[in-house]
């Protein structure tokens, strides 16, 4: 069976590279003694895949991993949760046979800074070319909260830009990937709730 796990990569763990994050997940799966399905060949590895890597330093609340397992129950869920560090918790688990990599088309971000960013005219560099940031976003909104600005925007998966390019050098900011969205704009977690089977503690295998 195919199980989709959603983790929150936050705190100091947001500074882990993608490879280090994958190793953390794999190590936790093994420590929880989950019934993993392995690849074939001389060096078998757990059959698993994840969505797009986010830049180091970005809080990722939508760190989705697709894992092939022989079985998955509420006990397995509890065992897995017990192996995870505090700043890399599991926030959801669903049995779903659909490929999340084929479903996801957008990502929603939030950027918090103490200064205003002119999204309309902001230019960033991508693959050696300078482009206008607004050309890569589907929508965005700007909110003011006391001494901070909150920028929320949605980007197409094929046009992802590093949010760190938007901020001033050596300035304070918090960049967050809030959620992955399907081609219809539905939150991936909502899709999984609707089309998959959520596994909770106490769920039978």
Image (cartoon, rainbow, N blue to C red):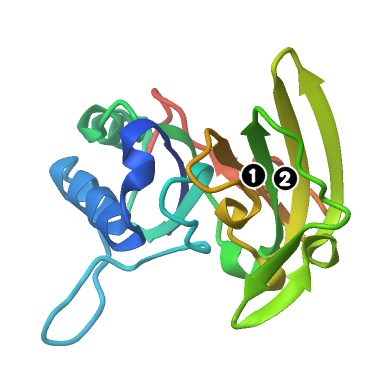
> Does the rendering let one see residue 99?
no
Secondary structure under tag 1 reads strand
Classify mark 2: residues with Cα within 10 Å, few (<14), some (14-19) or many (20+). some
x and y percent of residue 85 in the render? 25, 31
- Figure quadrant of the N terminus: bottom left
> Does the rendering let one see residue 125?
yes
x and y percent of residue 136 in the render? 78, 65
Residue 142 lies in quadrant: top right
- Figure quadrant of the C terminus: top left
Residue located farthest toward the left when viewing the structure as drawn: 42
Separation of residues labelled 2 and 1 (CA atoms): 7 Å
Please tell me which residue lies in front, 178 or 15.
15
State the residue position of label 2.
187
Secondary structure under tag 2 reads loop
The reply to whether the C-beta atoms of the residues labelled 2 and 1 are less than 8 Å apart is yes
Numbered label tally: 2
Please tell me which residue lies in front, 95 or 81.
81
Q: At 24% across and 32% down in the image, what residue appears?
A: 79
Closer to the chain start, of discs 2 and 1, is: 1
Residue 96 lies in quadrant: bottom right
Q: Which mark is on residue 115?
A: none
Give the side of residue 87 with respect to residue 153, left or right: left
x and y percent of residue 84 in the render? 26, 34
Q: At 77% across and 51% down in the image, what residue appears?
A: 154
Please tell me which residue lies in front, 185 or 151.
151
Q: Which mark is on residue 179?
A: 1
Whether 107 is drawn above or below 7: the answer is below
Give the side of residue 18 with respect to residue 96, left or right: left
Classify mark 1: residues with Cα within 10 Å, few (<14), some (14-19) or many (20+). many
């Amino acid at each position: 069976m195919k199980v989709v796990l959603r983790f929150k990569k936050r705190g100091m763990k947001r500074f882990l590279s993608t490879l280090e994050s994958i190793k953390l997940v794999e190590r936790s799966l093994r420590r929880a003694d989950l019934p993993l399905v392995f690849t074939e060949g001389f060096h078998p590895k757990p059959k698993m895949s994840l969505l797009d890597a986010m830049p180091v330093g970005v809080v990722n609340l939508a760190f989705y991993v697709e894992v092939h397992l022989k079985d998955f129950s509420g006990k397995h869920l509890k065992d897995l949760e017990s192996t995870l560090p505090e700043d890399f918790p599991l926030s959801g688990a669903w049995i779903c046979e659909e490929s999340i990599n084929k479903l996801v088309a957008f990502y929603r971000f939030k950027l918090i800074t103490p200064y205003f960013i002119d999204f309309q005219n902001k230019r960033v560099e991508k693959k050696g070319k300078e482009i206008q940031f607004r050309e890569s976003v589907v929508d965005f909104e700007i909110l003011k909260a006391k001494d901070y600005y909150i920028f929320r925007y949605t980007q197409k998966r094929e046009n992802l830009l590093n949010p760190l390019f938007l901020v001033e050098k050596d300035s304070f900011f918090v960049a967050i990937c809030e959620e992955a969205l399907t081609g219809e704009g539905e939150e991936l977690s909502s899709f999984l709730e609707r089309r998959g089977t959520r596994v909770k503690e106490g769920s039978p295998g």
